[in-house]
Structure formats: C-alpha cells, structure tokens
Amino acid sequence: MFEDLKVVNMKAKPHIWYSFSGEKAEKNQIGFYNTGEFDWVKDLESNYLIIREELLNYVEQEKDQIKPYFNKNLVAKKSVWRTSAFLFWKWNFRKNQKICPKTMKIIKQIPNLISASISILEPESEIKPHRGDTNGIIRGHLPLIVPNETELLGFQVNDEIKIWEEGKLLLFNDAAYHSAWNRAQSDRIVMIIDVVRPEFIPKTYRISSTILSSLVFQSIVLKISIIRKLPQVMKNAVIRLIAIFINPLLRIQNI
C-alpha cells in the first residue's frame, strides 16, 4: 500500500540532536514539511474515515486510560492535554493496539513508523512553545476532531501558523520550536505519528532506546530530586547507559 519514504532535502546537517543533551539545536530548521513529497500520505488520508471511527470509539471507551501528558510545565492548566499511545518509540502497547486493529493495520504500513498515539487538547487551553525530544523524526498530526471555531485554533512551528483540517495530515519538525492552542469550546483530537528521518533510518533503535531512557531518567529525577544537581555530562552518561539495556528489549518486542 505504502511506498518507501523519499529522501527529502533536509536543511539540517545529519547529526542526531536530543533535547536532554544540553546541545544547541540545529539552526535554520525546516518547520512544516510538504506532505506531497511523501507517497504514503495519500494512502493514509484515504483511510481517514476508518481511522477516525475506530479511534473516536477508543477515546469514548477508554477515557480513563487517556492520561494527562507527563510534562505539566508545557501547559498553562493541568490535565488539559491528554495522550494515549499505541506505539511509543518502537515500544508496542499491545492492549491498545488490539482495541484498534483496523487503524494499526493501516499505520503499520507506513515506512519507518516509530510512534503512534492519540492527543486530546481540551477547550480553552494551550501548549507552550517547546522543542521535542529529538530531530531524528518527522512528526505528523492527523486531525480527527477540529472545533468549528477555526479562528480560535492554531498550530505554530517556527514562525508559521497552520490550522488543523480534519483528515489532512500535517508533517513538521518536532525539534523546531512549536506550540498549539485551542481557545474553542470543544476538544481538538489528533492522531500523532512519528517516522524516522530518512538519513537516520539505520539508527532507528538507537534513537528509540535513547529517548525512552531519557524519559526513564526524567521519572527518576521526579522521585529523587538530588539527581537533578548532577553535571549534565553525568546525566547524559546515565541516560546512554540505560539505553544500552533498553535497546535489546525493543528489538525483542518487535520480532
């Protein structure tokens, strides 16, 4: 169904950047990608109604499983940004996948898919400007529900603002500064997907295990605050050590 990702003209140098590392992010980064450069986008959008019906049923049935995003510093009000994963940096959430078999069959045909999740941004809320975890991916929003008051909505990457349109995929650079707002009176719901940037495909498992280990480290820091005072170089070393153990687990889970 889907063809391989085309190699696109990337403005950034082929160096993997991680937000936890303390390194400066790429300069002059691309913001939004032209979806027309990816052959698989049309196939995904053509299956939009199937995905929308199944995922909205999931949202209705699994309300209690859709938790607030762990980083509360990114939102002005607590619990207004909620997420639930099906695939998270190559880690499979089998229970959730079984609830949405049609969706999983469709999206697993996307070349180099690394993550897929539901994202709900509640009314009168916003996600503050931030960079994502790494420049190693291209992130996509497939809007499932967009409030009618489009003048009250916005998604900004770098200096460009776009409005979600139901059934139309937005692709963007998660490592660029981006923010979102929903000042309407109903939820904005999107499916988020991540694919590995073409030049980093051989390092897919390294990227996945490194990000997962950084998230594990963040959870440890929340419980043992003294670790926060460690020098950055030591923090990075611990994260990469954890990644050494996570990497084979990811590979086994994806056999």
Image (cartoon, helix red, strand yellow):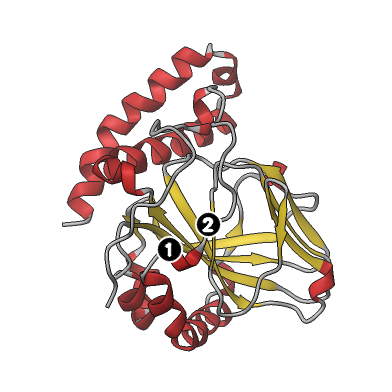
Say what amino acid the circle numbered 2 marks: Tyr
* 18 on left or right of 223: left
Give the labeled residue for mark 1.
37
Mark 1 secondary-structure assignment: helix
- Viewer-proximal residue, 178 or 125? 178
Q: Position of residue 116 (x, y in %)?
A: 43, 63
Would you place residue 229 above or below residue 130 in this image? above
Count neighbours of disc 2 (C-alpha within 10 A) and say few if under 14, some if 14 to 19, many if 20 or more.
Answer: some
* 195 on left or right of 190: left
Residue drawn at x 63%, y 44% is: 71
Q: How many marks?
A: 2
| Quadrant (top left, top right, bottom left, bottom right) of the N terminus | bottom left
Q: Position of residue 232 (x, y in %)?
A: 52, 15
Cα distance in 3D space between marks 2 and 1: 8 Å
Residue drawn at x 38%, y 48% is: 197
Mark 2 secondary-structure assignment: loop
Q: Position of residue 40 (x, y in %)?
A: 36, 71
| Quadrant (top left, top right, bottom left, bottom right) of the C terminus | bottom left
Say what amino acid the circle numbered 1 marks: Glu
Query: Is residue 46 shown to the viewer in this render?
Result: yes
Residue drawn at x 61%, y 79% is: 166
Do labels 2 and 1 touch, CB within 8 Å?
yes
Q: Position of residue 243 (x, y in %)?
A: 32, 32
Residue drawn at x 33%, y 58% is: 6
The numbered disc on residue 252 is: none
Would you place residue 113 above or below residue 20 in this image? below
The numbered disc on residue 33 is: 2
- Viewer-proximal residue, 152 or 36? 36
Say which quarter of the image contains residue 63: bottom right
